[in-house]
Amino acid sequence: MIVCKAALGIVGFYPHNQSVSSNSFQTPFFSYLYMSPLEILLLYIAFRIKQYVCDFVLQTDWMALTKGKPGAEGYKALFSHTIYHGVATTVIALVFAPALWWLGLVDFIIHSIVDRTKGLITYRKGWSYDSRWFWWSFGLDQEAHNYTHLAYIVLIVMIAGGIEF
């Protein structure tokens, strides 16, 4: 049973003959007893859009090419990139589960570790765009981010009380 306030064009369904209990989960946009499959899909889409925008639209050539280099220059590029992920995850958490506002910090740390590891290996091995190893490492990097987002989604659904079918 969900009361979904108008936000971001999302409209939820709430049976008129039932009321929201006092122990329902509340966010600025939603009141939950459970999350519907549609809301979980919207949460998943939010993380996919976040990944695309932060990794491919906002990441500059300097960030992408420098974040795997050793030293301060590499870390500056890395953190300039991963701060976008942390901020975007914080926004998603605030919309779907404000109690998990700290997920942005967790995502900043995990995304930094994954990208730094991939960047250092790629840099040290000298893999470039014409190497299949580069693309294998790129694929592993993206899957690591996907599984991280899956863990966040599971946590958010658990906090919201589970799934309503």
Image (cartoon, helix red, strand yellow):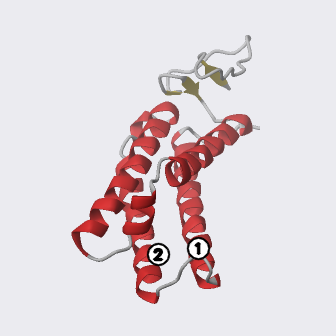
Horizontal and vertical percent position of residue 28: 47, 22
- Label 2, on which residue? 118
Horizontal and vertical percent position of residue 132: 65, 83
Residue furthest to the right in view is: 165
Image quadrant containing the N terminus: top right
Residue furthest to the top in view is: 16
In this orientation, does residue 103 appear?
no
Q: Residue at x 57, y 72 (%)?
A: 138
Camera-nearest residue between 116 and 132? 132
Q: In the figure, is residue 20 to the left or right of 27?
A: right
Amino acid type, label 2: Lys
Amino acid type, label 1: Leu
Q: Residue at x 64, y 45 (%)?
A: 44
In the picture shown, does residue 151 fall above or below 101?
Answer: below
Are the two marked residues, 1 and 2, in contact with CB atoms closer than 8 angstroms?
Answer: yes
Q: Residues within 10 Å of mark 2 (few under 14, many from 20)?
A: some
